[in-house]
Image (spheres, coloured by chain):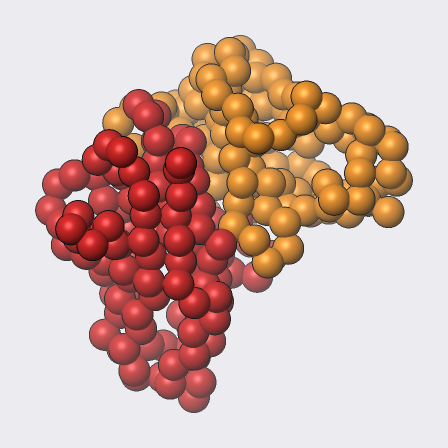
Amino acid sequence: AQSVTQLGSHVSVSEGALVLLRCNYSSSVPPYLFWYVQYPNQGLQLLLKYTSAATLVKGINGFEAEFKKSETSFHLTKPSAHMSDAAEYFCAKAEGSTLGRLYFGRGTQLTVWP
Amino acid sequence: ETGVTQSPTHLIKTRGQQVTLRCSSQSGHNTVSWYQQALGQGPQFIFQYYREEENGRGNFPPRFSGLQFPNYSSELNVNALELDDSALYLCASSTGQMNTEAFFGQGTRLTVV
């Protein structure tokens, strides 16, 4: 079964603290993995993607994620949170030969406290 | 800002009615996917169109249907609306090629009353 699991529907951090958003996936073939961010009343913006090249992927706004096959994980991190990082974050997996068909996790709402 | 535009941005319909949502894909993209995002949930794949043909469908009933036009823009039609159809509907366009990303529009917020 296709699935993406995001552990923790809400994460709260202080400004300047480490951000860690967790994502685990299941797949019978090597996956393509993505992190998207969604601000209120907006669509989805791609933060970063893993497409079987380097396992440590750097994205926009200082975010990065590491693909760990042994743990079937693709956790998103940022060393120092900023107030503007407050948003909903979605981990997603691509299926098959096209990357337009995505399977999303339920999302993690990130709150950043001053 | 992506080149994917959706219309309308908001819509209120009555249960049992029909609705058509529209999406203009980004220039150079021939693949459009539609997603339903219920409140507090992740987007769920409805279907995908590639060069005017349906190229995969998620777990949605037949009253959800779509079209893709020669210019690769797309429509999502929903018949016999139900209250549970209230959601944000997202359109994403891509080239359908490996190692390319899907670009999302801002979405259409549908409320069924």
- Is A67 on the left or on the right of B63, as rendered? left
| Residue at 86% over, 31% down | B17
Q: Residue furthest front?
A: A1
Compare residues B12 and B113 and report the one nearer the observer: B113
Chain B's shade in the image?
Answer: orange
Q: Residue at x 43, y 74 (%)?
A: A11
Name the residue located 53 percent from the left edge and 24 percent from the top edge.
Answer: B57
Looking at the picture, tell me which residue is in the foreground, A35 or B107. Answer: A35
> Whole-percent x and y of residue B21?
68, 31
Side of A5 where B39 appears, left or right: right
- Identify the hue of chain A: red
Residue B38 locus on image (x, y percent):
63, 49
Q: Position of residue A15 (x, y in %)?
A: 36, 84
Q: How many numbered marks appear? A: 0
At horizontal 64% and vertical 55% (from top left) the residue drawn is B39
**Residue A2 higher or lower than A18, as above or below:** above
**Residue A69 seen:** yes
